[in-house]
Image (tube, rainbow, N blue to C red):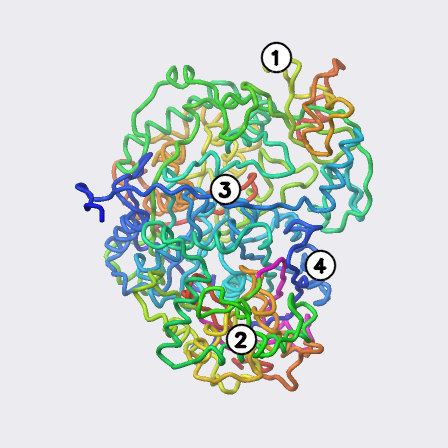
Amino acid sequence: MAKLRNVAIVGFAQAPIVVRDEHRVASEILYPQVRRALADCGVERDAIDYQVAGSADYVDGRPFGFVAALDVTGTWPPRQDLHLEMDAAFAAHYAWIRMQAGDCDTAIVCGYGKNSEGEPEHVLNLELDPYYQAPLGLGPTSTAALQASAFMARTGTTDRTLAEVAARNRTAGVRNPDALVRARATADDLERTPWAVAPLRKGYLAPTGDSAVCVVLATEGKAEKMCERPAWIRGVDQRIERQTLGSRDLSASAGARLAAEKALAMAGVGAREADVVELAATNPAEELILLEALGIGPSDAVNPSGGPLCGHPFMMTGLIRLGEAFRQLAGRAGDHAVPRARTAIAHATLGHCLQQNLFFVLGTERRWT
Amino acid sequence: MKRPVAVVGVGQTQHSSRRADLSIPGLVREAADRALVDAGLDYGDVDAVVMGKAPDQLEGVMQPEQFLAGALGAHLKPLIRVHTAGSVGASTALAAVTHVASGLFDRVLTVAWEKQSEGNAMWALSPNMPFTPPLVAGAGGFFAPYCRAYIARTGCPPHIGPMVAVNARDNATRNDYAHLREPMTFEDVMNSPVLWDPIRYLETCPSSDGAVALVVASEEQARKGPRKPAWIKAGYSYAEAMWVPGRDQVSPMAGKICAKAVYDAAGIKNPWKEIQTIEIYVPFAWFEPMWLENLGFCDVGEGWKIVDRGDQKMGRHLPVNPSGGVLCTNPIGASGMLRLGEAALQVMGRAGAHQVDGARNALGHAYGGGAQYFSMWLVSSER
Amino acid sequence: MNEPPKEPVKYVETTIHLPYHYVAGDVRARYLHALKEKKILGARCSKAGKIFVPPLVASPESFAPCEEFIEIAACGVVTTYCVVNIPVIGRNIEIPYVAASVALDGADISIFAMIQECKPEDVRMGMRVEAVWKPDGERQGDHEDIQYFRPTGEPDAPRESFLHRL
């Protein structure tokens, strides 16, 4: 394994997720998070070499909506900048790649966009190809149900198991002040919720909402000055698969398996060593599929933040997972801290049925010395 | 950049107002297939795919890279999608360069496209947004006031816009892929309707369907390939906030800073002397003199004189947009990468009928947003 | 069951309806409500003192928050403009119309506004204009409360004052 630059997450600020922010537009929700993330690192905006963001025009229905973020991210004087039409976690990956290229040492990564302004079920239908799949009227819940159904058929997983997975996430979310849903729910409670699209019950679905996120990355030499306990990126990888739902085995995620394998190999750790596993699974079947791809079973290490089931501002859910993993390793997870966390996995996904997957492996120790 | 990166393959589609013969996957494949054949590579050789396009509302699809992953051979590979408004094609190519420069990827396929005939482009570019007066009528409606300001500041005469437009069309007659290829006269332009005063219809870019793809690769790969590569000496993407008091939208600072960063990193001290040709993003004819100034090819106020003297024509000192540029071909998402790709073709000696003799250094440039995003690269025939 | 088509299907026509419900945000809402009272509000940067109209939560220039709202004059200078001759889907503005960048007195950034009550060819950079409001009783607290700007007839602003301030 070639020696790479050690890069760490050194800051994370997130607006608590709300169903609908009645008082601010997307860029206004983002502004204080950028300020806070930089303040927590003890630096001014000028100390940051690069900025990259992730968002999607369709989330709040504004073509070029991301341009407004330039006015709240300190983009004056002109800055080196990029924007990806993806979950902002992929923007963090790109920032890391850029640091490997030697083109920057510090970066802010932003995620924003108000889910509440559009209707996700309708909006996300448009991700499907416009010729064969979108006209079927499938939304993300329907396609997720297809995947859940395939998984359950292959593995014999029951509705009860899904309820238990969901309940564990909900229990964790109670202790996360940034979560949208902080009410405990038992497996019995969730198993009694009506079907959304069988085999997924309403109680198993991730509630969307409004938030904004800023994560700060820095290379070795700078990271130590910006954070007492940086979360070092030991490994990272992402993979996309074909979209056509019938063209891949939906019951498992070959892409997640490959991305996880590559990220963990780069990190030099096994998935079992992770004290924290933050997965951007938007329903319990997805969580189980991802855990299977990682080769580990359900446990309290998974989603101590409560995960997307406790709040899923889509297009930044993945970046929040990265931020949560950072919090745990940096000792900033407050009430939902996992004690003595040394290794964390953070995951992001895009597209229907876990079509694209990104894994970061973080650690309290640098990977390359 | 940690290690050298080269363009080893270029492919583009036949651009036209409507590619009714192809679906979206068909369109991107036409460009990607050509780029890979050009590079002597196959889809299996690609380590990562970097795709870019402008707002998805242009086609009524959302994050189409997801349904294109299979067609682009990206199954089980890393893929990212860039979107930086009009500059996207260029910032996408630069993101691909970063992937190779990092040492983590040796061969990256990068694709930029737009099939805007399938939606309503004018609406997608300036939809009625809530809580603001709906005054801006398309991109031209936004930029026309700044063209007027350029004219007022510099005393640029009224014939300059038409001269730029006529020359672009003349160049496009030598580019088989261009959308608009019929030559036109000065009178044609002057007789065309004024759309947003001072911009005339024939000084305005078309709405096109089209795609372009590049293969960017490591030095080792470049030396193995069948083509003489184009070496990317430097490339940067800069942005600036919109509502900065006193912000100059005629010659934005982000453009100046980006150009300076590229020239410094590429070792260019005098762009007018050391760069033989440029492909710059001119969607409305008046931007040609504006960008010549912004990019440091002349002093402020002198850009229009370059056009007036004809120095920007083929065969003259600094041919601008030998391909015909955005004025002749504008699939919005692709245009930025077309500029960068055409610059690469020039230094590879492969621009065919629109080749600029002796092109050693070429600049590819694009801009987007309210003249806020700037992405450009300097390519050279020499490593 | 229908018969299969005689020709292969080449085109798919899809109409997309996506409802969006927008929030103006408190800052923009305050600006819009003030229009009902014939007041134009700006926000002042807490660090550099620049005034933004419509008000912004933070200054894009200094990155500092804007904390104070102040009233701006409803008149200013046309810094630049264009004459729009083409219709846009979904809008019923009569063409040709003049879309201008107007620097209101006291503000540090310009607003876009329509110029009327004069022929398009008479509009000039540097022309002084004033807001024309909807009549009392008809204003709703939205951006249409200002119908357009019209020339005041005052002498044009000196060139240096607007040529580089777009």
Give above or below for A177 relative to A67.
below
Q: How crowded is mark 3: few (under 14 residues within 10 Å), some or many (20 or more)?
A: many
Residue type at mark 2 is Glu
The residue to which callout 2 is attached is A191
**Does residue A229 show up magenta in the picture?**
yes
Instruction: Check disc 4 and report the residue beneath it.
Output: A35
Tag 3 subunit:
B
Same chain for the residues under marks 4 and 3 in the image: no
Disc marking residue B265: none
Which residue position holds label 3?
A: B367
Asked if A334 appears above or below B111 in the picture, the reply is below
Whether marks 4 and 1 lie on the same chain: no
Q: State the CA–CA distance, disc 1 to disc 2.
A: 70 Å
Is residue B284 inside the magenta stretch?
no
In this rendering, would C104 be left or right of A319? right
Residue A292 visible, this orientation: yes
Task: Pick whichever, C125 or C98, lies toward us.
Answer: C98
Q: What element carries label 4?
A: helix
Q: Distance of mark 4 from mark 3, alpha carbons?
A: 28 Å
Q: Give SS at disc 3.
A: strand
The residue identified by callout 1 is: C119
The answer to whether marks 2 and 4 sit on the same chain is yes
Chain letter of mark 2 equals A
User: Quadrant of the rendered structure where residue B358 is?
Assistant: top left
Helix, strand or loop status at disc 2? helix
Q: In this view, does A137 lie above or below C28?
A: below
**Which residue is at a point 62% across and 61% down the rendered structure image?**
A213
Q: Name the spot of residue B65 as percent of width and height, x first.
A: 39, 55
* Mark in front: 4 vs 3: 4
* Magenta-drawn segment: A208-237
